C-alpha cells in the first residue's frame, strides 16, 4: 500500500490530447471575474494562456527581471490595454495588493529559487481570499519517474501545510521527456 501522501498523486499521466501549457492552465482553472496573480511570469507565455480564458477579471504578474517585463508586456499588450492585466518588476514582498485580494495565485518553476519558501508561501497565503487557491507548477528536470519526483513534491506539500494551507493535492503529467507537477492548496 502507498503511503497517504503518495495516494494523492494522479500518476504520471501521458499526453491526453493536450499540450503541457494546456495542462498547466487546467491546474490554474481561471474563471471570469477572478483576480489572479502569477509569480515569476518570465516571457509571459503562461500569462497569455491564462489571460485568454478571461473575458472579465484581473490578471496580475510580478517578475524580478526588467527584460522579462518587456517581453511579457509585448506578448500581452492586448490584455494590458484592455485593463485585464497589470505587470510589474520586483519581489513578492513589494506587491502592493491588499490582503485577501486574489482568488488564485500561481507560479511556474519559481519556488526553487526562493531562499525562504515558507516565508514566501505565508506572504502569498495572506494575499489569497478564503477558499482561494495557490498553485505551484514545476518541472523537475532531474526526474523521469514518479518516485524520482516524490521527494520534491513532499517538500512543497510540507511547506504549503506549514503555511496554513489545506487540501493540498499533487498532480503530475508527462507529455515529453520530463514530468510536470502541480501542487495545489486552498486557503481556509
Image (spheres, rainbow, N blue to C red):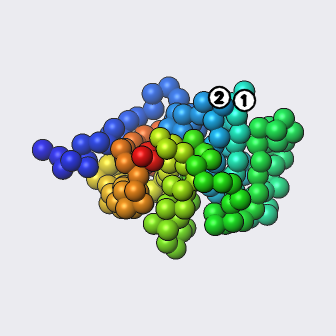
Residue at the limit of the structure toward the bottom, as seen here: 115
Pinpoint residue 95: horizontal percent, then vertical percent.
68, 60
Pinpoint residue 11: horizontal percent, then vertical percent.
32, 40
Crowd tier of the residue under label 2, counting other residues whose Cα lies within 10 Å: few below 14, some 14–19, many 20 or above:
few
Q: Residue at x 60, y 30 (%)?
A: 31
Q: Residue at x 12, y 44 (%)?
A: 1
Tell which circle, 2 or 1, labels the residue nearer the N-terminal end. Answer: 2
Q: Residue at x 75, y 62 (%)?
A: 89
Confirm or deny contact between disc 2 and disc 1 (CB under 8 A).
Answer: yes
Q: Which residue is mark 2?
A: 32
Q: Secondary structure at mark 1?
A: loop
Pinpoint residue 150: horizontal percent, then vertical percent.
32, 55
Q: What's the CA distance linking mark 2 and mark 1?
A: 5 Å
Relative to 24, does residue 67 appear above or below in the rendering?
below
Q: Nearer the viewer, residue 130 or 140?
A: 130
Q: Which residue is mark 1?
A: 56
Amino acid at each position: 500500500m502507498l503511503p497517504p501522501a503518495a495516494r494523492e498523486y494522479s500518476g504520471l499521466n501521458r499526453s491526453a490530447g493536450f499540450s503541457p501549457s494546456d495542462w498547466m492552465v487546467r491546474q490554474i482553472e481561471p474563471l471570469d471575474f477572478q483576480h489572479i496573480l502569477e509569480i515569476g511570469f518570465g516571457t509571459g507565455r503562461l500569462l497569455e494562456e491564462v489571460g485568454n480564458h478571461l473575458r472579465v477579471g484581473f490578471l496580475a504578474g510580478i517578475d524580478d527581471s526588467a527584460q522579462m517585463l518587456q517581453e511579457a508586456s509585448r506578448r500581452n499588450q492586448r490584455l494590458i490595454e484592455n485593463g485585464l492585466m497589470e505587470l510589474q518588476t520586483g519581489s513578492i514582498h513589494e506587491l502592493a495588493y491588499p490582503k485577501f485580494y486574489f482568488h488564485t495565485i500561481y507560479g511556474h518553476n519559481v519556488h526553487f529559487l526562493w531562499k525562504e519558501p515558507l516565508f514566501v508561501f505565508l506572504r502569498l497565503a495572506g494575499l489569497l481570499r478564503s477558499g482561494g487557491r495557490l498553485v505551484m507548477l514545476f518541472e523537475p528536470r532531474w526526474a523521469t519517474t514518479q518516485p524520482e519526483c516524490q521527494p520534491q513534491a513532499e517538500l512543497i506539500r510540507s511547506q504549503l501545510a506549514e503555511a496554513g494551507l489545506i487540501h493540498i493535492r499533487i498532480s503530475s503529467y508527462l507529455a515529453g521527456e520530463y514530468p510536470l507537477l502541480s501542487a495545489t492548496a486552498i486557503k481556509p
